[in-house]
Image (cartoon, rainbow, N blue to C red):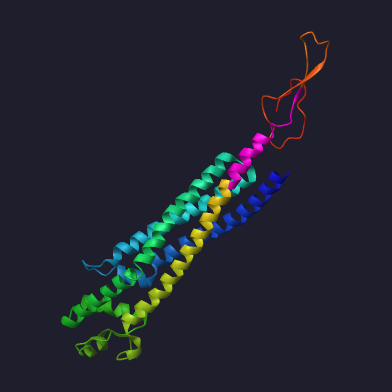
Amino acid sequence: MGLRCGMKTIKCQLLVTSLCVMLLGLSIATLSTVTHYGPHFTLIRDISLESNSYRVIHHTAFYFGICISMTLILAALLGSVAMVRESQSLTAMGFFCFALAFCGLVPAACWRYTHSTEVEESMMDVYDLVYEEVRRNASSFRRHELTAIHKVFLCCGKHSPFGDTTNVESKTCPPGQANDAGQDCLQEIQFFLKKHMDFVTTLLGITIGFTVYGMILTSFLWFSIHFSSNLDRKGKYILRESTQGLGGRWLFHRPACSCLHCEEVCISTMHC
């Protein structure tokens, strides 16, 4: 009785956890897509510089996020089906998917912690390089890229120690924003990315917590199903008529098979 009550509790918790994990997987997929195709990120990615280190980070984050989201959704689906069917094989597959997602999320969280400013610095380096090229020469191509950055980030130039940025800002800043000291582009880029990366960090932490909980629940469910199957063998007998000189007496024998969730008594030659 206690084992059945424990299984019901585990199944209810696993259902709720699977639903949350599926929503988290969809959130990660949405965030990865928005980051990959968002104008703030694609503009910096598409700038043709040999030293554009952000391009590698951009593509890696997208494909990593899609893979993690697919693994989480698969784990949630397997956990839900295993909960309904009480299948040991599906439960083991669900645990494996949760563990696989965990092995991917933990390195991502560690990278975010140890390289907390690498994304911001790579994007600001790209802006610095474009800005300096426009300041040194009159390349129309670079000036067009710098103008697009100012338009997307709603900023205008940067504070330069050379003090000769007025000409650059007047040609590349949107109307009404030139010489606006409160719209330094480096600060705007850093502020925008800080909010974005804080959201990513929070999402990673919540997802890791639910992934660990999903691993615990699927492992408990697997053991519960396993021991429930073994306990069903106890106390069940087959009633057979003896044919070896016992005067037609009936003898009880343990069955050769078990009935999972079965209350019927196996009589004579009937098997589960």
Tell me residue 20's x, y (percent): 57, 59
Q: In the orientation shown, which residue stands out farthest toward the left? A: 137
Q: Is residue 185 left or right of residue 79?
A: left
Q: Which residues are magenta?
A: 220-238
Residue shown at 65% from the left, 36% from the top: 229
Residue drawn at 54 percent across, 60 percent down: 23
Q: Which percent across, then down, holds residue 118?
A: 32, 69
* x then y, percent, for residue 4: 70, 45
Please say whether residue 60 is one of the residues in the magenta stretch.
no
Nearest the viewer among 252 and 83 is 252
Instruction: Using the image, determine if residue 148 lies above or below residue 9.
Output: below
User: Is residue 58 visible from the viewing direction of this image?
Assistant: yes
Toward the top, the furthest residue is 245
Which residue: 49% across, 48% down? 97
Q: Quadrant of the C terminus?
A: top right
Q: Main secondary structure of the magenta part?
A: helix
Asked which quadrant contains residue 50, the reply is bottom left
Q: Is residue 258 above or below residue 3?
A: above
Q: Would you say residue 231 sits in the magenta stretch? A: yes
Residue shown at 27% from the left, 66% from the top: 53
As displayed, is residue 11 above or below residue 155?
above
Relative to 180, does residue 35 appear above or below in the rendering?
above
Residue 137 can be seen, yes or no: no
User: Which of the pair 129/241 is nearer the observer?
Assistant: 241
